[in-house]
Image (spheres, helix red, strand yellow):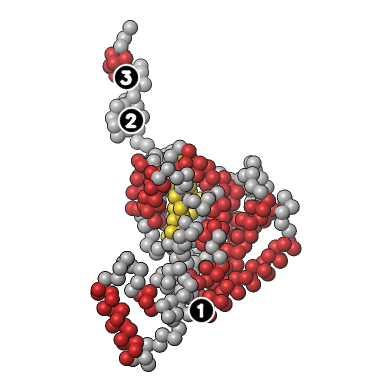
């Protein structure tokens, strides 16, 4: 009988008759071949969905309570209402900047509903709905956007750069991609601490072109960290369409290259997004593996209030998406078919939520700006001498030249 070693040697000596396993550490599952083949085309990753465009369930919907389904829909409408009012407020010069989520509401609520408050969230800048679902109030949103004395960031951030420790939502920053490797570090810490929680990181298709994306996926894969990478592929990176961004099969195809479990989901189907995120979370916790989710959606609104999307896409294209594949319309049809929603409820909720948003809006606008002491505090545990000197100098100038430094609009 041949020994195991001699058997391997014989197989290598006769490659024409045996499938030979390569032994290189860089590709341990590869096999030898005598045929030269340049690989280019791979099967296109399918897009998972639960609901069709008319709100019909094509497969078993998630077993969610009726109250949860209605809450998801109401949060989608709330986000939409806040977007309308705050976009107009920016155009009136009442706040400096805003970003809407038109067309992407399902990615917010579907994923947020599948998480727990123990999970750590790293947003990019279009995840207000995730924060809303986790319990961030309209007052808290408005205080941040007006940078008043109740703003948790004390006026140090641009509007829509939210953050709150109590909801495990890390403060948003403007640079693209920086939050992706940070999320991996946090996921690895959760793993080392033995916590049954994940770190989820949201970003767009444009941010996936940043080097941080690639470094993060590789780090998460090799450390087997419980990180969910949630890519909102909405068709445009500001003004750059996806056809000018990449030639491969979207963002999902990149996951396989890093050994990361991958899901492509219909981002306009809130129930499909819920199922995908729920399964990704299970894999992260039970199998200690990171997961990449590519949610296919469409950005109906401008990139931000600094953008005019009509310069790079037709208004007809936008209108077609609004008409044919609105995530809100699709989910409403599903709820109506299941007797959970109707036109009367729609009108009443729309009226009530607009009043609530405007009430918070008005209250936040009337409040004073943060104290000027916030210019120097909370950077160091103990304020260093050079900052103490600067703070004292500012106080001296304000006192000496009150006609040039009006501080009545700031909290003391």
Q: In which quadrant will I find the N terminus? A: top left
Horizontal relation, residue 262 to residue 65: left or right: left
Mark 1 neighbour class, 10 Å CA radius: few under 14, some 14 to 19, many 20 or more:
some
The quarter holding residue 376 reads bottom left
Q: Which mark is residue 276?
A: none
- Residue 252 in the image: state x and y as whole percent: 45, 45
Work out how far the residue at label 1 is from the one at label 2, CA to CA, in angstroms.
Answer: 63 Å
Q: Who comes first in sequence, dot 3 or dot 1?
A: 3
Q: Secondary structure at mark 1?
A: loop
Q: Which mark is residue 28?
A: 2
> Does residue 157 lie above or below 266 as drawn?
below
Of residues 168 and 354, the one nearer the viewer is: 168
Residue on which disc 3 sits: 15
Q: Secondary structure at mark 3?
A: loop
Residue visible at 57% across and 52% down in the picture: 113
Horizontal relation, residue 89 to residue 331: left or right: left
Q: Who comes first in sequence, dot 1 or dot 2?
A: 2
- Residue 322 in the image: state x and y as whole percent: 60, 60
Residue visible at 37% across and 91% down in the picture: 402
Q: Who comes first in sequence, dot 3 or dot 2?
A: 3
> Does residue 39 lie above or below 156 as drawn?
above
Marks 3 and 1 in Cβ contact (< 8 Å):
no
């Amino acid at each position: 009988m041949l020994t195991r070693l001699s058997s391997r040697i014989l197989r290598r000596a006769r490659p024409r008759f045996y499938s030979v396993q390569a032994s290189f550490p860089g590709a341990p599952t590869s096999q030898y071949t005598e045929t030269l083949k340049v690989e280019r085309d791979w099967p296109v990753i399918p897009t998972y969905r639960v609901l069709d465009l008319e709100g019909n369930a094509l497969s078993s919907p998630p077993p969610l309570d009726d109250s949860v389904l209605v809450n998801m829909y109401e949060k989608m409408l709330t986000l939409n209402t806040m977007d309308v009012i705050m976009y107009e407020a920016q155009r009136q010069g009442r706040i400096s900047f805003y970003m809407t989520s038109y067309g992407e509401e399902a990615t917010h609520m579907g994923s947020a509903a599948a998480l727990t408050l123990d999970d750590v969230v790293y947003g990019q800048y279009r995840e207000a709905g995730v924060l809303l679902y986790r319990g961030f109030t309209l007052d808290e949103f408005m205080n941040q956007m007006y940078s008043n004395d109740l703003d948790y960031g004390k006026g140090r951030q641009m509007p829509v750069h939210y953050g709150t420790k109590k909801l495990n939502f890390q403060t948003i920053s403007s640079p693209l991609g920086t939050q992706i490797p940070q999320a991996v570090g946090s996921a690895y810490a959760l793993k080392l601490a033995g916590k049954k929680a994940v770190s989820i990181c949201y970003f767009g298709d444009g941010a996936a072109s940043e080097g941080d994306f690639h470094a993060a996926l590789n780090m998460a894969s090799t450390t087997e960290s419980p990180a969910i990478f949630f890519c909102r592929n909405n068709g445009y990176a500001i003004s750059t369409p996806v056809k000018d961004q990449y030639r491969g099969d979207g963002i999902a195809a990149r996951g396989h290259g890093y050994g990361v479990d991958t899901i492509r989901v219909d981002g306009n189907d809130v129930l499909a997004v819920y199922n995908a995120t729920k399964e990704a979370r299970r894999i992260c916790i039970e199998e200690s593996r990171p997961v990449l989710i590519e949610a296919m959606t469409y950005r109906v609104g401008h990139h931000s209030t600094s953008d005019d999307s009509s310069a790079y896409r037709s208004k007809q294209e936008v209108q077609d998406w609004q008409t044919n594949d609105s995530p809100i319309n699709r989910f409403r049809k599903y709820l109506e078919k299941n007797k959970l929603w109707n036109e009367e409820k729609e009108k009443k909720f729309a009226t009530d939520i607009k009043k609530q948003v405007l009430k918070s809006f008005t209250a936040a606008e009337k409040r004073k700006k943060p104290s000027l002491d916030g210019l120097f505090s909370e950077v160091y545990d103990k304020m260093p001498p050079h900052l103490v000197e600067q703070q004292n100098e500012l106080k001296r100038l304000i006192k000496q030249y009150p006609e040039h430094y009006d501080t009545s609009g700031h909290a003391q």
